[in-house]
Image (tube, coloured by chain):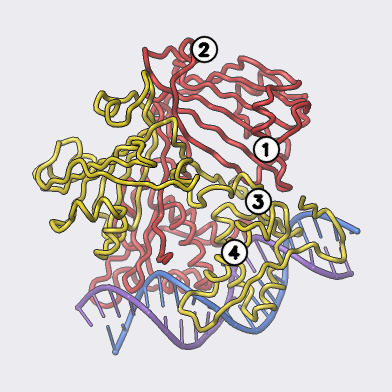
Chain colours: A yellow, B red, C purple, D blue
DNA sequence: TAGTGGTCTAGACCACGCA
DNA sequence: GCGTGGTCTAGACCACTAT
């Protein structure tokens, strides 16, 4: 229980265990944000608890208030805390920060601590279907890396991941792809998408999907498409992912519009 | 006047039509952000275009650089622009800002300019199924407002919206609900959720959904649940919405993780 | 009235990319 | 070297909330 309606003089703020290393290359606001986030995830700061006031935090760590505000702004953006003028900043309800912070796909099996695995079904380089080139806004003649993977959890097939890469990556090896995430491999090669757009929908499974995922009759697919761009706005990666709808849901934290007229 | 293509040799920055009213109660950072966003949506600033530099903007409107940065930060958060150190800030690829900015449900029919409508199928007050009370973390005996609506576009049924409200709202009238959005009505009563959590999944349609939405055989449902909390962390609204999967997709802009390692 | 978050200033130094 | 965005400071005044 985290009752905080309490005393007016004694502020019921919880002092999270935080320390700031000014010599670290990690920005101060990031250090503070991470440590507060950790305190929330570990339950040291519980839903409803007040954070220490901004001025107080600034004094305690001898940093400026704008820097403290920036830290807390990070937590607000993640939905971990709620700011209220004249009152204080409190930890959000548990449901909001129980799962993955960053609005990504939530897998209730990996959450249970099981082992994921990947099988590469296809890895090729060449021209692709016009549909794909169109989605990526590329000339249909452009050769692309085409990649199809089956994602398993605890040896049960969970998703089919199809990706196309407009990148010079002839060195991609099957063994790498089975042991690392695609984005991890791209990062190793210095490739960081600047923005990406995802869309989430659903449809009936194709017969291939039925077979590969071992679905029951009439079971739908959660399908997620993603298109990632480099810093120059060129599309570099397109993905079509099919998830078992009985195992996956997508989670999003929605923040309120401040006033917005 | 501080140029737009001035500096080194040819800096292709576009000077958007912006003016700032310092006497307005609207914060300066918000004014600037909105006007830049409008310029992007209207195509005055096109994908790939450089924004004026932060220092230049600050000088031009006689505001401080932190304020300018905050404005641009808003656009970054919406995925409208990409910042690059040492280079500048550019407008994101078109695909990223073509649709609804705020990561909400995109309806390709309303986008075509057609008229939405709402039919109230049920409006009641009393005890609810234990499942609902559990989702809202309330005592099962708590009486709630239960609301079921059918959303139509161009007279075609598009979604079934089921909502439960832990609020003293005995004055909710069917006529209001058919002419206004639920959140609009809540706002009129001074109720603003502080945080909300949405999850998106899919499943087969029930027979009721089949009938109400006029679905074809085997057609899945995109189902979205949402749970909204007030500032004290109390759940105030829970919703289960079933969308036709052939008409709706959910869109999310994913921003890159800065470094995070 | 006292304390909170919300906005804003006028600087500063830095890391980075590019010509 | 120069301009860019990234971080940070040490204040200020305001609006709001609770008592």
Q: Which residue is mark 1?
A: B187
Q: Residue B22: which numbered mark, if any?
A: 4
Q: Quadrant of the C terminus of chain A?
A: top right
Tags 1 and 2 in contact by the CB under 8 Å rule?
no
Q: CA distance from mark 3 to mark 4?
A: 34 Å
Q: Which residue is mark 3?
A: A92
Q: Residues within 10 Å of mark 1 (few under 14, many from 20)?
A: few
Compared with B121, B72 (above or below) is: below
Tags 1 and 4 in contact by the CB under 8 Å rule?
no
Q: In which quarter of the view is residue B126 placed?
A: top right
Helix, strand or loop status at disc 1: helix
Helix, strand or loop status at disc 4: loop
Q: Which residue is mark 2?
A: B208
Q: B256 or B51, which is in the foreground? A: B256
A16 vs A78, left or right, is right
B69 vs A58, left or right, is left
Q: CA distance from mark 3 to mark 2?
A: 36 Å
């Amino acid at each position: 229980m985290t009752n905080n309606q309490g005393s007016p003089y004694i502020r019921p703020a919880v002092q999270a265990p935080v320390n700031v290393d000014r010599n670290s290359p990690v920005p101060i606001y990031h250090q503070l944000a991470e440590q507060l986030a950790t305190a929330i995830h570990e339950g040291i700061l519980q839903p409803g608890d007040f954070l220490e006031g901004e001025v107080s935090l600034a004094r305690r760590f001898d940093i400026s208030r704008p820097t403290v505000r920036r830290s807390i702004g990070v937590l607000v953006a993640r939905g971990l805390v709620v700011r209220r003028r004249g009152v204080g900043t409190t930890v959000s309800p548990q449901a909001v920060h129980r799962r993955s912070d960053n609005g990504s796909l939530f897998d209730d099996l990996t959450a249970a601590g099981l082992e994921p695995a990947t099988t590469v079904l296809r890895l090729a380089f060449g021209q692709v279907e016009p549909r794909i080139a169109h989605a990526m806004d590329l000339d249909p003649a452009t050769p692309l890396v085409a990649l199809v993977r089956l994602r398993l959890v605890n040896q049960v097939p969970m998703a089919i991941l199809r990706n196309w890469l407009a990148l010079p990556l002839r060195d991609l090896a099957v063994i790498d792809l089975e042991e690392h995430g695609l984005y991890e491999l791209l990062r190793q090669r210095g490739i960081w998408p600047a923005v990406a757009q995802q869309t989430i929908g659903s449809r009936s499974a194709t017969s291939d999907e039925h077979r590969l995922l071992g679905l029951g009759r009439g079971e739908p697919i959660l399908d997620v498409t993603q298109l990632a761009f480099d810093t120059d706005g060129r599309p570099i990666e397109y993905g079509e992912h099919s998830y078992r709808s009985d195992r996956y849901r997508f989670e999003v934290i929605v923040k309120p519009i401040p006033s917005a007229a």
